[in-house]
Image (cartoon, rainbow, N blue to C red):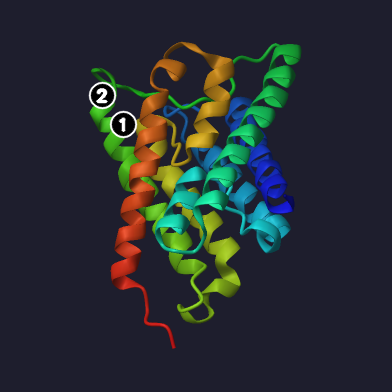
Amino acid sequence: MKKYLAEMFGTMVLVLMGCGAAVSLGCNNADPETVVGTAFAFGLAVVAMAYTIGGISGCHINPAITLGCFLSGRMNAKDCGMYMVFQVIGAIIGSAILFALTESSGLVGTGANDLQANGAGTITAIGGLLAEIVFTCVFVLVVLGATSKTNGATNNFAGLAIGLSLVLVHLCCIRYTGTSVNPARSIGPALFQGGTALANLWIFIIGPLVGGAIAAAIWKVIEPAKE
């Protein structure tokens, strides 16, 4: 049970800090400094949690990572399902705290993902879905490689590598979807923000899960042979 609770706490912190920074900074694609700040907030939250709960649960705090680990044979079906459930619960708790803070402070939003505006209107659903698949695939592949016991000494720095890769993914993907690459991170804020964030939530569930599955398939092909 401790590892499930660790996943819940870790995901809560990720959503509260990452989405909280997005709200506090007023993350806007027209203001690059707010995008950079938001990207680093999510990355630093992952680094912090990796070194806090990594030894307890592995610090997935993301259903797409959990799916990738399951498909790679690193965990059983029961743990996979329970991790996902507790990650979503943690995201909802984090979003509830953020919602309470913003409502009491006169701020708007919970940092929910949504299709972003472009010169012609908004990013299309297909465009957003493709972005989430591609960038989640890259992110989960980094996680699988950095934490692999057959990949030399890289796993000693897994938390830092994963956190920095999440910063990079945010810098590239915020322009399209606000960057999810994590279904739990999207579910929690969307429940409180509603509107198009909730209507488009399917993109931020299907896209990351497909991306995580593809990453697992790629890793199986390139994984170093066990000694």
- Could you say which disc has been placed on residue 8 in the image? none
Which quarter of the figure has residue 192? top right
Q: Is residue 210 visible?
A: yes
Tell me if residue 70 comes above or below residue 219 in the rendering. Answer: above
Q: Residue at x 36, y 35 (%)?
A: 206
Q: Residues within 10 Å of mark 1 (few under 14, many from 20)?
A: many
- Report x, y in % for residue 148: 49, 71
Dots 1 and 2: beta carbons under 8 Å?
A: yes
Relative height, residue 103 to residue 26 (above, below): above
Residue furthest bottom in the image: 227
Identify whether 9 is placed above or below 29. Answer: below
**Quadrant in the picture for the C terminus:** bottom left
Disc 1 marks a residue whose amino acid type is Gly
Q: Quadrant of residue 18?
A: top right
Q: Secondary structure at mark 1?
A: helix
Image spot of residue 42 (x, y percent): 57, 43
Towards the viewer: 85 or 191:
85
Q: Is residue 117 left or right of residue 12?
A: left
Taking the spot 36% from the left edge, 29% from the top edge, the residue there is: 203
Image: 23 above or below 81: above
Q: Which residue is mark 2?
A: 124
How many other residues sit within 10 Å of disc 2, few (<14), some (14-19) or many (≥20)? Answer: some
Give, as a three-letter code, the residue at label 2.
Thr
Q: Label 1, on which residue?
A: 128
